[in-house]
């Protein structure tokens, strides 16, 4: 889960890219970067931290010259958290190509071997985004002559589709020519493009979510379709082509549950309306399975559950209250690295309003329950605030399986619902009752916004991976490499190397 943006404009793009990344900050809080192009010159700044911290001086912004550029906010699921892994990434041949990527490849190791043995290209990091960059660069180098034409770009994307597996929504900048956005043949991760009228002509923008276009005054033209590529030249010409042989649309349903902003439109589905319908479906389940409920008040866990929680309360005819006040200077706990940091951050992020809990039977509503850390702490906080009974409702079904397409749900052992029945979950979470959304109700809530989408990737709920290349061996390797324990071991090893270097150099 990362955020990408790219702009071709008739005026400098540095401020627009900064603003776009700030709007997309919810998609990644680990690192940020922007690269711009002025003629044949490239200007790059990227570092660890939030957008405002990476570009914190006027000098940083002034150096990003040019009317074309791409940007990225990073949330690490593969590789490690270092500035070397921050994006955009760059390779100098052919032409000079920069790339920003949202998603996760599922055949990274095989591609690395091919790139080295057959393409003679060196991969310098553990990032699958660098793999994507080099595949695209190699395919383009095999096709293009001294001058680049749109057909070359589309054939290169087609070649990438034939080789890469998994989820990828990308924006790449080709030095001297323009930017290209493309999406994997299943369209798992979102990406859109739009245009804005200026005095000199049309400006174009590619972004992970439509809200980034809205804020900058761009009109949404379309989502980039699964397998499709959009090539925008520096002179403002736009070219669009389907580049995959057999695209099959299966977008990630978790975007609508949690990842995307509610004011975004993804694949013609209003995220806000999808979450309203999730609340309706959840209320209907409560009325069906628990008609004599004794809920006094519905309280959402801010921010992503507010929409569903409010609609649920209306449907139940129960009072809705904001019972938790959020510290907006603490990041999203779901995407924080490490269990200890997540647990510590919950109480720093949320503080209960005691009068909304004392002596009441409270239904807490959250978008989902993943590791369970946040839910356990919040339920305990509600009890400490004086709630008589604490019920907990999830707008999503139980998360039982790892995600392999760019969301940090990497190992089944870290998912509280994996291998446990409903009674066990209630005891572990510490709630008097836990209510989960049914999977078909979730699908119906989202699909109602666009009935043309026949299938969603629901792999975290049902274990069915749309790329059909995920087996037990892959998941076992994923657990070894990407569990919290494995990440902590790598961080500790990296810190030890730094300490040894500092000691040796005095």
Image (cartoon, grey):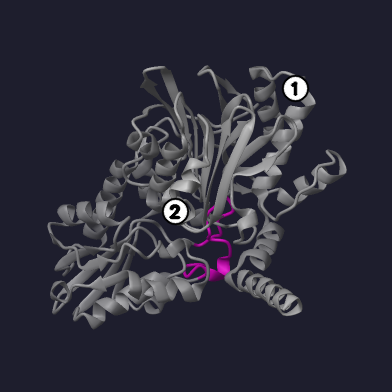
User: Any mark on residue 129, and which?
Assistant: none
Q: Residue at x 43, y 61 (%)?
A: 398
Which class describes the residues within 10 Å of circle 1: few (<14), some (14-19), or many (20+)? some
Q: Residue 441 at what x, y percent from top left?
A: 35, 49
Q: Residue at x 34, y 34 (%)?
A: 214
Magenta stretch: give its range. 400-419
What residue did someone put label 1 on?
A: 144
What residue did someone put label 2 on?
A: 56
Q: Residue 170 at what x, y percent from top left?
A: 57, 38
* Residue placed most toward the observer, 259 or 152: 152
Q: Residue 203 at what x, y percent from top left?
A: 44, 24
Q: Residue at x 18, y 67 (%)?
A: 293
> Disc 1 or 2, which lies upstream in sequence?
2
Q: Indicate the secondary structure of the residue bearing disc 2.
A: loop
> Magenta span has 411?
yes
Residue 112 is left or right of residue 368, and the answer is right
Q: Residue 304 at what x, y percent from top left?
A: 32, 55
**Quarter of the rendering occupied by the C terminus:** bottom right
Residue 387 is left or right of residue 86, and the answer is left
> Magenta span has 451?
no
Of badges 1 and 2, the one in the foreground is: 2
Number of on-image labels? 2
Dots 1, 2 in contact, CB < 8 A: no
Q: Is residue 165 visible?
A: no
């Amino acid at each position: 889960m990362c955020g990408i943006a790219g702009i071709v404009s008739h005026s400098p793009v540095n401020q627009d890219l900064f603003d776009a990344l700030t709007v997309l900050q919810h998609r990644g809080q680990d690192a940020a970067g922007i690269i711009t192009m002025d003629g044949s010159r490239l200007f790059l700044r990227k570092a660890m931290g939030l957008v405002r911290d990476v570009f914190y001086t006027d000098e940083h912004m002034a150096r990003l010259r040019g009317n074309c550029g791409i940007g990225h906010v990073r949330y690490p699921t593969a590789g490690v958290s270092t500035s070397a892994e921050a994006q955009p990434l760059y390779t100098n041949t052919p032409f000079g190509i920069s790339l920003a990527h949202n998603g996760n490849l599922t055949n990274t190791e095989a591609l690395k071997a091919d790139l080295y043995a057959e393409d003679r290209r060196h991969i310098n990091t553990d990032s699958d985004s660098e793999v994507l960059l080099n595949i695209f660069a190699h395919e383009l180098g095999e096709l293009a002559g001294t001058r680049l034409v749109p057909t070359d770009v589309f054939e290169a994307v087609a070649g990438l589709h034939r080789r890469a597996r998994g989820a990828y929504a990308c924006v790449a900048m080709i030095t001297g020519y323009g930017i290209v956005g493309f999406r994997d043949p299943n369209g798992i991760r979102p990406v859109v493009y739009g245009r804005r009228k200026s005095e000199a002509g049309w400006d174009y923008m590619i972004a992970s979510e439509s809200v980034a276009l809205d804020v900058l005054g761009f009109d949404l033209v379309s989502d980039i379709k699964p397998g499709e590529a959009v090539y925008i030249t520096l002179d403002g010409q736009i070219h669009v082509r389907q580049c995959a042989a057999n695209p099959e649309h299966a977008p990630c349903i978790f975007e609508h549950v949690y990842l995307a902003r509610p004011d975004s439109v993804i694949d013609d589905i209003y995220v806000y309306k999808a979450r309203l319908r999730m609340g309706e479906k959840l209320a209907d389940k409560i009325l069906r399975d628990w008609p004599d409920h004794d809920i006094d008040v519905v309280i959402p866990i801010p921010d992503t559950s507010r929409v569903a929680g409010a609609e649920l309360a209306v449907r139940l005819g129960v009072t809705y209250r904001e019972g938790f006040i959020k510290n907006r200077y603490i990041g999203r706990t779901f995407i924080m690295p490490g269990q200890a940091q997540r647990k510590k951050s919950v109480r720093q992020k949320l503080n209960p309003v005691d009068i909304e809990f004392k002596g009441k039977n409270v239904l807490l509503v959250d978008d989902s329950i993943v590791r369970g850390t946040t839910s356990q702490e919040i339920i305990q906080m509600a009890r400490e605030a004086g709630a008589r009974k604490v019920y907990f409702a999830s707008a999503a079904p139980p998360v039982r399986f790892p995600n392999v397409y760019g969301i940090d749900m990497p190992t089944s052992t870290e998912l509280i619902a994996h291998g446990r029945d409903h009674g066990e979950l209630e005891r572990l979470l510490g709630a008097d009752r836990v209510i989960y959304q049914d999977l078909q109700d979730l699908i119906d809530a989202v699909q109602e916004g666009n009935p043309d989408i026949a299938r969603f990737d629901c792999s975290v709920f049902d274990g069915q991976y749309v790329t059909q290349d995920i087996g037990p061996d892959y998941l076992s390797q994923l657990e070894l490499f990407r569990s919290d324990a494995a990440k902590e071991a790598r961080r500790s090893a990296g810190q030890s190397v730094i300490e040894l270097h500092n000691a040796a150099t005095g």
